[in-house]
Image (cartoon, rainbow, N blue to C red):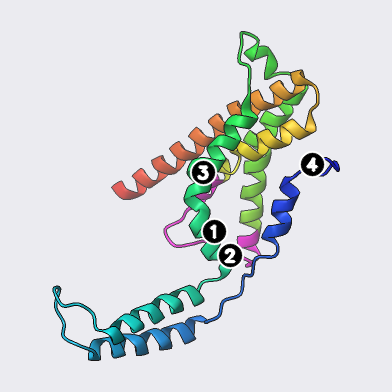
Amino acid sequence: MQSGIHSTVAGVAVAATIPLNVRLDLQQFVIKIKGLISQFERQGDTGSRVLTTPHQKEILEELERASKDVESPLQRLEHSIHPWVAFGIMPLFALANAGVVLDSRLTQIIFEPVAFGIILGLIVGKPVGIFLFTWLSIRLGIGRMAEDIGWLHIVGVSLLGGVGFTMSLFIADLAFISPEYSNQAKTAILLASLVVGLSGYLLIKLFNSNINRS
């Protein structure tokens, strides 16, 4: 931070060093699990009130190790820290970076160049970009549409992609030194996120309801 580089860059650098490879591929995992389960079944009696034998305990520990080996360290780390990030770090981060002042000038603020540009970017730019690239990748055969998914689902998800909160507020803090511009940007981010979030949710919910009724 003192050198002029934001501290979050360190997090990006650390994340790039976490291995994505697995020790066991899917076929090796299946073969190993089947063998261990067969051994487990051959050991001791069955029943809900019977304690596992020492050998069965070893097999269970081996099953646990195999389950970890088929997952990459990156996946295991992501899974273990998800509750802390989702329910602790992200809300605190959002609250620390919000600091938006809402007053009677709200209608004027949203038509200021900074705010209006951000609103257009989140409500129009991101959804249109996500939808068009999805459509293009499917038409070119790069990707394929999942089962039970329609184009209105893609439109809804594209709208949800326009939601900008924690990182958008963070970037606004870095981009605008002026408190006035910073407040305009944050106000626009919150309003635009609310619009696309509700629009995307209602569109997907409505489309799913129509499918279920049919």
Disc nearest the viewer among 3 and 2:
2
Q: Which residue is mark 3?
A: 156
Q: Determine whether 58 is above or below 107 in the image.
A: below
Mark positioned earlier in the residue sequence (4 or 1): 4
Mark positioned earlier in the residue sequence (3 or 2): 2
Are the two marked residues, 1 and 2, in contact with CB atoms closer than 8 angstroms? yes
**Relative to residue 185, is residue 75 drawn left or right?**
left
Give SS at disc 3.
helix
**The N terminus sits in image quarter:** top right
Q: Which residue is mark 2?
A: 74
Give SS at disc 2.
helix
Mark positioned earlier in the residue sequence (4 or 2): 4
Q: Which residue is mark 4?
A: 1
Q: Which residue is mark 1?
A: 78
Q: Residue at x 48, y 86 (%)?
A: 28
Are the two marked residues, 4 and 1, in contact with CB atoms closer than 8 angstroms? no
Q: Amino acid at mark 4?
A: Met
Magenta stretch: give its range: 137-157
